[in-house]
Amino acid sequence: MENLLKNKQYNNKLGIIGWFYAGKYHIERYAYILHRITGFGLILYLLFHIFVTGERAKGEQAWKNIMDFLNQPLFKFLEYLVLVAFLYHAINGFRLILTELAIFLGKPASPKYPYVTSINRQRILFFILMILAAILIIFSSLEFFKLI
Amino acid sequence: MAIEKNQEIVEAKIVKFKVFRFSSEESDEPSFKIYEIPVKKGMTVLDGLIHIKENLDSTLNFRYSCRMGVCGSCGMFINGLPALGCHTQISHLNSDIVEVKPLPNYYVIRDIVPDFNSLFQKHKSVKPFIIREHIEELGNPTSEYFQTEEEKELISQFTYCIKCGVCSSACPTLATDSEFLGPQAISQAYRYSADTRDEGFLERIKILDSSHGCWRCHFASSCSQVCPKGVDPAFASQLIKREILLMRFGLKKKRKGAPITTLTKEVKRLEEIPEPPKRTLR
Ligand code: SF4
Ligand code: SF4
Ligand code: FES
């Protein structure tokens, strides 16, 4: 019965677009998207990293070969992306650990219009941590490209 | 265009409504239809749709009842955000074109009418009622359970939920995982579990602490942004996560449900307060 009905209905599920399109939603939704993308990138890096370090087991020559191969601007750039992704993911993740333990979200109270929600209350934490992430990313970029 | 009202002539602005149309009898694919509507000050998107239905196209389907943000029937996707049609003034959209689509993450029955079966099933699954160990008292109450003003304040905002489903249509987790309980059900699970009169926390945990339960919420908090009643479901979701963790680590304080207030039989009703109507439920 349920299925018969569903056949006649239009499935309005957003699917994966719901993850990556934030449209008019507020800044934390964009932070969520970036968190997913950086998290995915870090997992890919981890797999690649295990593969690369695994080459050592095949002896010194194999290790040298892969090291030479990786010594290209492309991999240098990808490594830089890993650094940036790590810093963002770690710092935003720290915010999520706090907020998911309901720290910085304030106390429940009767809603009064215009509504102030827990997102508004944690936003100051969000901005402070994002500024921190930006500072760390700038300094580590300078260090990474040996500019200081 | 001018509209006559109480003898005074109010200049109306013409706004285009781009409305999502779907009928399985006509086509499997939805389409859009454009209507031009004279908009007066104070007119809501729902008023606009009613204008279309009455004057331009009687085949348009949408759901509403109260027209004042109470019944939770008129959730729709308006110019890129889910909202209540009756709660959104056209002039506040600051746009000459209003795009009206059905709420995302639900099946669409027809036009902009979403199927709320899944929403209500999930709401039901978290046992949204007071649970007590003393079943006899619950079934045949002798009096009210005691609750202070401060205790009420802990859950007050979550009790404002009108089950409009707007929050769940904003949730990115529900966009891919239809089994996920969603902000509506999770916030109601918290609303009852945090109620000092309730003793059902452990029963609700079975549903919440599962693979489609509260841990799927990643605090994208779009639900709280769009909730028209200030319920802040994302907040409730994080609060219940904390409660579950506290319980897992044995840190949650055990509490008994609130005591029963003085037996009503001993209390005399004040003269000016009328008798309640006869019970209709048995
Ligand atoms: S929490 Fe808010 S948006 Fe969600 S169903 Fe309840 S009233 Fe609607
Ligand atoms: S806070 Fe949680 S429940 Fe609310 S929209 Fe985000 S993922 Fe969904
Ligand atoms: S018609 Fe009742 S909430 Fe909009």
Image (cartoon, coloured by chain):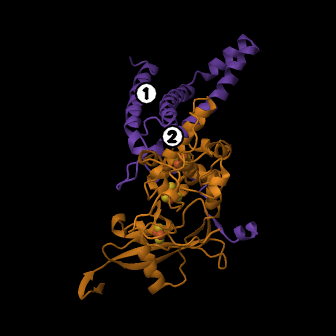
Chain colours: A purple, B orange
Q: Quadrant of residue B98?
A: bottom left
Looking at this view, is B268 or B247 the one in front?
A: B268
> In the image, is residue B150 above or below residue A64?
below
Looking at this view, is B1 or B54 the one in front?
A: B54
> In the image, is residue A66 above or below residue B101?
above
> Is B124 placed left or right of B277 in the picture?
right
Q: Which subunit holds the residue at mark 1?
A: A
Is any atom of residue A2 visible in this view? Answer: yes
CB within 8 Å, label 1 to label 2: no
Q: Which subunit holds the residue at mark 2?
A: A
How crowded pointer 2 is (Cα within 10 Å; few <14, some 14-19, many 20+) is rated as some
For disc 1, the marked residue is: A137
| Residue A8 percent location from the top left of the image | 69, 72
The label shown at residue A34 is 2
Specify the amino acid type for callout 2.
Leu
The yes-or-no answer for disc 1 within 8 Å of ligand 2 is: no
Q: CA distance from mark 1 to mark 2?
A: 15 Å
Which of pointers 1 and 2 lies earlier in the amino acid sequence? 2
Is any atom of residue B218 visible in this view? Answer: no
Q: Quadrant of residue A123?
A: top left
The residue lying at 65 percent from left, 59 percent from top is B121
Q: Secondary structure at mark 1?
A: helix
Specify the amino acid type for callout 1.
Ile
Q: Quadrant of the N terminus of chain B?
A: bottom left
The residue lying at 51 percent from left, 40 percent from top is A34
Discs 1 and 2 lie in a common subunit = yes
How crowded pointer 1 is (Cα within 10 Å; few <14, some 14-19, many 20+) is rated as some
Q: Secondary structure at mark 2?
A: helix
> In the image, is residue B91 above or below residue B261?
below
